[in-house]
Image (spheres, grey):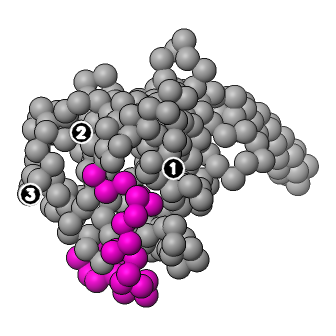
């Protein structure tokens, strides 16, 4: 009787051991498959769209270098999705003291780069047919916004396209890219064409450097010191966008529009 019980216990342990080994093997195979699964073109596009979305400020730059940078609020959120899967984002910028009065409004269209190009994400900006109707789009409840079909109808002329690539190992950024060297047509404030550089960082920052040049290649608007660095607002602020943002920046910043930043470039 005792011997029989001992044999049964030993057999049960062997079975449990075999099952455990099988689970480990299966788990290892699944993990290996997951690690080997390559990031798709649409994964990159979704990552860029998600990184651009939210409320971000150039507060720190304005404090450190008020002669070259304003404290601006950048706000981006999903507007609709195209049939091909491209994401359309609504984008606006305003001075932090007057977020209800954006001076720049755009639609961003985010999609994978064409297969023949050596980049990951194509980010195009478009004018808005009736920009006044879209002011504070992200701050409104969904039933108070223009609906998806209206958004598509209100996508106006193409402005710029930036081709973004995944940053190499060791860099602070996740994606970076720029417009072609020749830029895109732009006639604001004496410009003949404009260029844009964009980088998305691991900490949620978005760096944007927009510049305008005359026909001879002289820069006529945009910062010369470097890109604007927009850093994410605390989540509590984004959850309650209607609450006042009590940042201590000089009032004079908003009055010193000496072409350091484009206020109405299109």
Asked whether residue 73 is drawn in magenta, I would say no
Sooner in the amino-acid sequence: mark 1 or mark 3: 3
Q: Secondary structure at mark 1?
A: strand
Q: Residue 148: horizontal and vertical position, in percent?
A: 15, 39
Sooner in the amino-acid sequence: mark 2 or mark 1: 2
Look at the image and tell me in which quarter the C terminus lies. top left
- Above-or-below relation of 128 to 39: below
Point out which mark residue 144 bears. Answer: 3
Whether residue 12 is visible here, answered yes or no, is no
Which residues are drawn in magenta? 236-264
Asked whether residue 240 is drawn in magenta, I would say yes
Q: Residue 159: horizontal and vertical position, in percent?
A: 32, 34
Q: Identify the residue under disc 1.
A: 209
Q: Nearer the viewer, residue 174 or 251?
A: 251
- Above-or-below relation of 101 to 176: below
Tell me which corner region of the image, top left, top right, bottom left or bottom right, holds residue 72. bottom left
Residue with the most extreme top position: 116
Horizontally, residue 55 falls left or right of residue 139, namely right
Q: Residue at x 88, y 50 (%)?
A: 6
Q: Residue at x 34, y 36 (%)?
A: 186
Q: CA distance from mark 2 to mark 1?
A: 18 Å
Horizontally, residue 146 falls left or right of residue 193, namely left
Q: Residue 42: horizontal and vertical position, in percent?
A: 47, 29
- Few, some or many residues within 10 Å of mark 2 (<14, 14–19, 20+): some
Q: Nearer the viewer, residue 243 or 221?
A: 221
Whether residue 228 is visible here, answered yes or no, is yes
Q: Identify the residue under disc 2.
A: 127
Q: Nearer the viewer, residue 10 or 207?
A: 207
Horizontally, residue 122 falls left or right of residue 257, namely right
**Majority secondary structure in the magenta region:** loop
Sooner in the amino-acid sequence: mark 2 or mark 3: 2
Tell me which corner region of the image, top left, top right, bottom left or bottom right, holds residue 215. top left
């Amino acid at each position: 009787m005792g011997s029989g019980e001992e044999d049964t216990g030993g057999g049960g342990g062997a079975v449990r051991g075999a099952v455990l080994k099988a689970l480990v093997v299966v788990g290892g195979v699944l993990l290996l498959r997951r690690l080997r699964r390559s990031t798709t073109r649409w994964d990159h596009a979704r990552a860029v769209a998600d990184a651009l979305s939210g409320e971000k400020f150039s507060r720190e730059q304005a404090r450190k270098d008020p002669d070259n940078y304003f404290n601006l609020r950048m706000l981006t959120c999903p507007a609709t999705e195209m049939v091909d899967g491209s994401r359309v984002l609504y984008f606006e910028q305003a001075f932090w003291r007057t977020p209800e009065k954006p001076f720049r409004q755009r639609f961003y269209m985010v999609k994978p780069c064409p297969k023949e190009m050596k980049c990951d994400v194509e980010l195009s900006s478009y004018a808005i047919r009736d920009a006044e109707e879209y002011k504070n789009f992200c701050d409104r409840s969904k039933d108070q916004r223009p609906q998806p079909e209206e958004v598509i109808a209100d996508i106006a002329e193409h402005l710029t396209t930036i081709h973004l690539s995944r940053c190499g190992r060791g860099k602070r950024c996740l994606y970076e890219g720029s417009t072609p060297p020749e830029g895109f047509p732009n006639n604001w404030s004496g410009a003949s064409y404009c260029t844009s550089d964009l980088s998305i960082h691991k900490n949620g920052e978005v760096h944007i450097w927009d510049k305008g040049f005359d026909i001879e290649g002289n820069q006529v608007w945009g910062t010369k010191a470097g890109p604007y660095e927009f850093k994410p607002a605390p989540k509590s602020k984004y959850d309650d966008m209607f609450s006042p943002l009590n940042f201590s920046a000089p009032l004079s910043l908003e009055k010193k529009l000496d072409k350091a930043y484009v206020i109405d470039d299109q």
